Image (tube, rainbow, N blue to C red):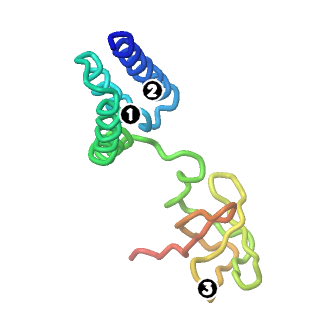
């Protein structure tokens, strides 16, 4: 029985190390919750709790950590995350280079020195060359734009 207990202790210890290494490599807040479950199971193994209970507690603790603490952690770890690539274009202004007409499937804009295909949010809206637009979304390789409203 003692050999089996030592095996369980080593198994949970290895699981903790592997899960933590995976978390450090990915930085995705995915395996850290399972490392927490493995830690609790490791403690149970040290106290010779049966393996089935260790596995059950591992699953329950991991699931509870995932459900209750992940949303909070994601909120705090990602609050200062800078939007990158295409995400960063949303909200920027662009200039229409060729008329945007969803029905014809035409439209090009320039934003930050780059030329993009564009379409409006509604099919019945056409935007002329030279119009200033705001980028509202990105779908595939097309910018979804809306004409900028003039402020008085």
How many angstroms separate mark 1 from mark 3 (CA)?
Answer: 51 Å
How many angstroms separate mark 2 from mark 1 (CA)?
Answer: 7 Å
Residue 119: percent from the left, percent from the top? 65, 74
Determine the image quadrant of residue 76: top left
Q: Say whether disc 1 or disc 3 marks the residue closer to the N-terminus.
A: 1
Q: Is residue 20 above or below residue 58?
A: above
Q: Which label is found at residue 125?
A: 3
Q: Say whether disc 2 or disc 1 marks the residue closer to the N-terminus.
A: 2
Judge left or right: residue 49 versus residue 23. Answer: left
Q: Is residue 11 above or below residue 27?
A: above
Q: Is residue 148 above or below residue 5?
A: below
Which is more toward the observer, 152 or 59? 59
Judge left or right: residue 11 versus residue 98. Answer: left
Who's the residue at 67% across and 69% down the image? 118
- Considering the image in quadrants, where does the N terminus appear? top left
Residue 89: percent from the left, percent from the top? 56, 55
Q: Are discs 2 and 1 less than 8 Å apart at CB?
A: yes
Choose mark 1 or mark 3, whichever is in front.
1
* Residue wearing tag 1: 34
Residue 88: percent from the left, percent from the top? 53, 51
Name the secondary structure under disc 2: helix
Which is more toward the observer, 7 or 104? 7
Who's the residue at 35% across and 39% down the image? 59
Q: Say whether disc 3 or disc 2 marks the residue closer to the N-terminus.
A: 2
Name the secondary structure under disc 3: loop
Who's the residue at 75% across and 78% down the image? 105
Q: Which label is found at residue 19?
A: 2
- Considering the image in quadrants, where does the C terminus appear? bottom left
Determine the image quadrant of residue 77: top left
């Amino acid at each position: 029985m003692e050999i089996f207990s030592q095996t369980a202790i080593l198994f949970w210890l290895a699981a903790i190390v592997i899960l933590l290494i995976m978390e450090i490599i990915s930085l995705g807040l995915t395996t850290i919750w399972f490392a927490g479950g493995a830690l609790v199971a490791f403690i149970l193994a040290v106290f010779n709790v049966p393996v089935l209970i260790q596995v059950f507690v591992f699953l329950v603790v991991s699931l509870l950590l995932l459900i209750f603490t992940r949303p909070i952690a994601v909120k705090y770890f990602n609050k200062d995350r800078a939007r990158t690539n295409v995400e960063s274009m949303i909200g920027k202004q662009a200039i229409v280079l060729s008329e945007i007409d969803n029905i014809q499937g035409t439209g090009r804009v320039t934003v930050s020195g780059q030329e993009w295909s564009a379409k409006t949010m509604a099919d019945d809206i056409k935007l002329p060359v030279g119009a200033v637009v705001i980028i509202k979304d990105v779908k595939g390789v097309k910018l979804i734009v809306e004409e900028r409203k003039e402020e008085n």
